[in-house]
Amino acid sequence: MEVDWWTGLPAGVLVCGIGAWAQAAVRHRPGHNLWRGGLLALGSAVVVAAVAGPLDRAGRDGLLAAHIVQHIVLADLAAPLLVLSVPPGARRRMLANRAGAIIGRPFIVLALWAGLIYLWFVPSLHREAMPGGAAHLADQAAFFAAGLLLWAIVFDARAARPLGAALKAGGLPWWARHLYAMGSRALLIPAAAVLWASPDARYHLRGGWDFSMTRSDDGETAAAIMTGFEMMLFTFAVFLVFILVAAKEGDHDQTG
């Protein structure tokens, strides 16, 4: 494991977050229980593995597939785990102030999420971010922050409102939150298509190549990983919607 300021800064932020969670647990704040502590530990471990393990090293050396997997791990694995580690009451309080009211609006979050992701898919910025340093930190921090914002809407703890009001101020009904998650996955398909269609070196570092696969194979692998993972999440969301709809209809049949 290579430790430098890139690994040190996320580690410091993570330690502060764990400390705040632990302090709330010591004070017996509602919801800070064992299973949420487990989610916090697991999410933290995923972040550490992504930024300080072999995945980061391979990405810095120029392997595009490793760099894309690092994005997925931070935005779609670590982020939802850490969001769920925060008790619902605490999440509601975070969105109750003026700043929270702005970033808790579904359309604003979706636009910000898509904008950050597509910004870092500009080939010149993507190549600049791969080797390490400030651009690398900004790239991974952007994907992680975008993931936290998006999953905070998907797992919104605020009381459900009518759809029109919820789209403006948050509090989406359960079915709308699942559609929201599915829509966010669909927005990434063009990015994966760009990877499929790109010339061999468009997203790769210039210079030597020390991997067994070719740059072209690496680009195709990165696109396949991105497409496959996003479609897996999309399919899971659809499947979950059907389960929940069936459960709701079953409840209505029993009461009707």
Image (cartoon, rainbow, N blue to C red):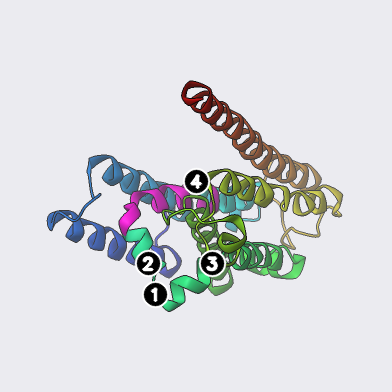
Counting residues from the N terminus, which is met first, the one under dot 2 or under dot 3?
A: 2
Q: Is residue 36 above or below residue 133?
A: above
Q: Are marks 1 and 2 in contact (CB under 8 Å)?
A: yes
Residue 103 drawn at (x, y percent)? 51, 69
Q: Is residue 93 above or below residue 34?
A: below
Q: Quick check: 72 left or right of 183?
A: left
- The amino acid at mark 2 is Met
Magenta part of the chain: 74-89
Q: Alpha-carbon neighbours of circle 1 within 10 Å: few (<14), some, or many (≥20)? A: few
Residue bearing the label numbered 3: 169
Q: Mark 4 or 2, which is nearer the eye?
A: 2
Counting residues from the N terminus, which is met first, the one under dot 1 or under dot 3?
A: 1
Residue 204: in sight, yes or no?
yes
- The amino acid at mark 1 is Asn
Majority SS type along the magenta span: helix
Estimate the spatial distance between the alpha carbons at disc 1 and disc 4, rounded to whole Å: 27 Å
Q: Residue at x 60, y 54 (%)?
A: 59
Label 4's element? Answer: helix
Residue bearing the label numbered 2: 94
Q: Which mark is residue 97?
A: 1
